[in-house]
Image (cartoon, rainbow, N blue to C red):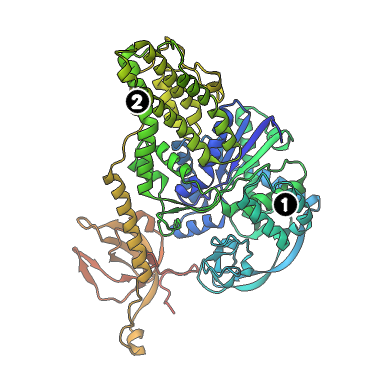
């Protein structure tokens, strides 16, 4: 597509079940933001869309874990993610969410049109069912061994190790993520998208149409799936959290999250258009619009095969022009893991490195996993900041501004005569917008950022070679020309650094006291800072990062690693001595309900509970004050030892014991009845 009228750019919808980490930024959001900022610097018509994915199984898993509703999880993490994106300068036109009414309506309408057009097939199939939990298991509620690579922790929809797209029934030794039991197969009815009917079309569209312009990792994955032959994929699920299937006879079923989520790009565009008083349709239906999806490699199959088939089957929408997916970013040589806390969390980074958002943007782009997995290390983070941002970019700007203030009171001097070296530098300067453009247009953001830094590097070399601080006494007219040329380089860095270092670009613009934004190609025109223009006084654009700051981060990771190793090595306590049945029969184990909970004064460990045992109301003291807030436990059903001899703790008589255990991460977990029961029931 040549010279599109407009661009629609999307970034993968992150699950609203936890905070963001550096892997998220590296996978989709910084590349997407660089691309969009580049387009906007050319005054292109671009719509940049994202939002939180609020219907995935990870949401319900997190909700169960925290004992709150899925909507409460969504609201909590949607705000946290939105704030993090804003703090790091990710300039979405709209950051929406898939639990909003406008999305429910859009997804329902999309499904209904495809249904009435005969685009689905209805099948009764066998799906995995958890007898203990009494529910069908959606993909992410099942883990097991990948049939392709043997990875033992694959999910029911995808193996995160080899990238294979799976169905839950493909897994070897499947287990329920809810109860840990082995599920059974049970028959259920669902609607399927017949991907096999689009196999030939996908061969034509992807294998022939995008072999050259799509990244090799993306093209390779797509070709592999297509060559193996696609199978129908269910677009509905047996769940109670999601968008209800808008059909009679589909009660208790919702739209599959990977059917509903990408439609979120469309609903978010509608929401933006309503707010701005604009028409959303040209951004999705006009063939003069270029649609680009920025994603991580785990989303390739959904954005390159499933969603395009949905768009094709619907019939009213344009198809993605490119899907520049990145691979994974590791941390200190190990795979990022949210469950093991092996991550650099964005909200924590903002506290530890206040005002250094651009440093992280820069380092992540420098190590971008564009074609293969790459690594983030704290030592590299420090080196790149101190050597490249401080030593090259910051040093050049500081020297230029300090010398201009010292010799000319901050007034841009007029060039008197251009030597050959001056003209060569100015001519080279004019080539940078095109060089960086070529890299960005091909989604080579690492290369583009290197070229941006090369411009500052050229400025440093120019000053070092010409040595204006030596010539000021013998050739003052020559110094005017040198500093004029150097200031043009400094000004050119404003638009050319903005996609990568937006906060620094704004600081530089303020420092050089430019009122209007510079266009991307203005450096080609020259004379960005005319003679007589006054600039501000020198400030440091970047600060050195000290060894102590890096050591603090390494210590934090070392502590995490130690805790993970301890958890992995934690042995089950040996069995105690054998008891007779009569000994066990003496225990009075009952169900009870917590009526009141409060901290015991002057104790940081003890909570005092008033519980209803079914036979009476009594006080029980438990040492879990560090793990729980009293108010969150009121109303909880628990199991207790009712006939334990009373014991005084911190002056409070405890008349029983609440039964608890620890999970694999060392977190205290209540032993509680799975079904609603009366207080006072015996444990069988």
User: Closest to the observer: 447 or 385?
Assistant: 447
Q: Is residue 677 left or right of residue 261?
A: left
Q: Quadrant of the N terminus?
A: top right
- Residue 193 x/y as whole percent: 73, 56
User: Closest to the observer: 677 or 24?
Assistant: 24
Q: Can the viewer see residue 111? A: no
User: Closest to the observer: 354 or 39?
Assistant: 39
Tag 2 residue: 398
The tag on residue 251 is none
542, above or below 473, in the image: below
161, above or below 483, in the image: below
Q: Image point 36% across, 21% down: which residue? A: 401
Tag 1 residue: 207
Q: Image point 29% across, 49% down: which residue? A: 552
Q: Quadrant of the C terminus?
A: bottom left
Q: Image point 26% across, 61% down: which residue? A: 606
In terms of image quadrants, where is residue 405? Answer: top left
577, above or below 5, in the image: below
Identify the element where label 2 is drawn: helix
- Residue 58 x/y as whole percent: 52, 57
Identify the element where label 1 is drawn: helix
- Residue 614 x/y as whole percent: 39, 70
Question: Badge 2: how crowded within 10 Å, few (<14), some, or many (20+)?
Answer: some
- Residue 343 x/y as whole percent: 41, 53
In terms of image quadrants, where is residue 592? Answer: bottom left
Total marks shown come to 2
Q: Can the viewer see residue 680? A: yes
């Amino acid at each position: 597509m040549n010279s599109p009228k407009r661009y629609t750019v999307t970034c993968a919808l992150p699950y609203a079940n936890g905070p963001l980490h550096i892997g998220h930024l590296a996978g989709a959001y910084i590349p997407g933001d660089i691309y969009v900022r580049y387009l906007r610097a050319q005054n292109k018509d671009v719509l940049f869309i994202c939002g939180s994915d609020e219907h995935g199984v990870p949401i319900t898993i997190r909700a169960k874990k925290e004992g709150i509703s899925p909507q409460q999880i969504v609201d909590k993490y949607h705000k946290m993610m939105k704030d993090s994106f804003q703090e790091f300068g990710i300039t979405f036109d709209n950051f929406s969410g898939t639990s909003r009414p406008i999305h429910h309506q859009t997804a329902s309408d999309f499904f209904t049109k495809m249904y009435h057009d005969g685009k689905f097939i209805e099948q009764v199939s066998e799906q995995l069912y958890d007898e203990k939990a009494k529910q069908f298991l959606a993909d992410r509620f099942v883990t097991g061994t990948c049939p392709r690579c043997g990875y033992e922790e694959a999910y029911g929809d995808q193996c995160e190790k080899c990238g294979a797209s799976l169905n839950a029934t493909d897994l070897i030794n499947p287990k329920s993520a809810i109860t840990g039991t082995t599920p059974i197969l049970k028959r259920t009815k669902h609607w399927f998208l017949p991907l096999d009917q689009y196999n030939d079309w996908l061969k034509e569209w992807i294998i022939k149409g995008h072999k050259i312009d799509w990244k090799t990792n993306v093209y390779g994955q797509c070709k592999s799936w297509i060559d193996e032959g696609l199978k129908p994929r269910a677009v509905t699920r047996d769940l109670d959290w999601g968008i209800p299937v808008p059909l009679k006879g589909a009660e208790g079923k919702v739209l599959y999250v990977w059917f509903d989520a990408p439609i979120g790009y469309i609903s978010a565009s509608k929401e933006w258009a309503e707010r701005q008083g604009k028409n959303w349709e040209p951004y999705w239906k006009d063939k003069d619009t270029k649609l680009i999806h920025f994603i991580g490699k785990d989303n390739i199959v959904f954005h390159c095969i499933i969603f395009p088939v949905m768009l094709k089957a619907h019939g009213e929408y344009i198809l993605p022009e490119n899907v520049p997916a990145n691979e994974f970013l590791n941390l200190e040589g190990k795979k990022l893991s949210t469950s093991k806390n092996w991550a650099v969390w964005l909200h924590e980074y903002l506290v530890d490195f206040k005002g250094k958002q651009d440093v992280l943007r820069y380092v992540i782009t420098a190590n971008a996993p564009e074609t293969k997995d790459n690594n983030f290390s704290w030592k590299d983070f420090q080196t790149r900041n101190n050597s490249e941002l401080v030593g090259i970019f910051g040093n050049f700007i500081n020297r230029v501004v300090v010398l201009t203030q010292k010799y000319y009171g901050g007034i841009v001097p007029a060039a008197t005569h251009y030597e050959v070296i001056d003209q060569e530098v100015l001519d080279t300067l004019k080539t940078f917008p095109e060089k960086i453009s070529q890299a960005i247009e091909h989604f080579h953001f690492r290369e583009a950022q290197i070229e941006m830094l090369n411009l500052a590097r050229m400025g440093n070399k120019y000053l070092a070679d010409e040595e204006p601080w030596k010539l000021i006494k013998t050739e003052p007219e020559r110094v005017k020309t040198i500093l004029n040329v150097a200031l043009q380089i400094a000004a050119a860095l404003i638009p050319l650094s903005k996609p990568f270092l937006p906060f620094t670009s704004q600081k530089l613009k303020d420092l050089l006291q430019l009122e209007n934004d510079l266009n991307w190609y203005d450096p080609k025109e020259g004379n960005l800072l005319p003679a007589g223009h006054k600039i501000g006084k020198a400030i440091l654009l970047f600060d050195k990062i000290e060894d102590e700051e890096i050591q603090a981060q390494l210590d934090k990771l070392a502590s995490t690693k130690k805790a993970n190793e301890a958890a992995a090595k934690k042995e089950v306590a040996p069995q105690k001595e054998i008891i007779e049945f009569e000994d066990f029969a003496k225990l009075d184990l009952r169900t009870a309900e917590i009526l009141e909970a409060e901290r015991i004064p002057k104790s940081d460990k003890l909570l005092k509970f008033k519980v209803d045992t079914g036979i009476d109301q009594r006080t029980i003291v438990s040492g879990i004050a560090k793990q729980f807030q009293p108010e969150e436990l009121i109303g909880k059903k628990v199991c207790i030892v009712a006939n334990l001899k009373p014991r005084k703790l911190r002056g409070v008589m405890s008349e029983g014991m609440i039964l608890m255990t620890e999970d694999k991460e060392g977190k205290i977990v209540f032993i509680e009845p799975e079904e609603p029961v009366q207080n006072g029931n015996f444990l069988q």
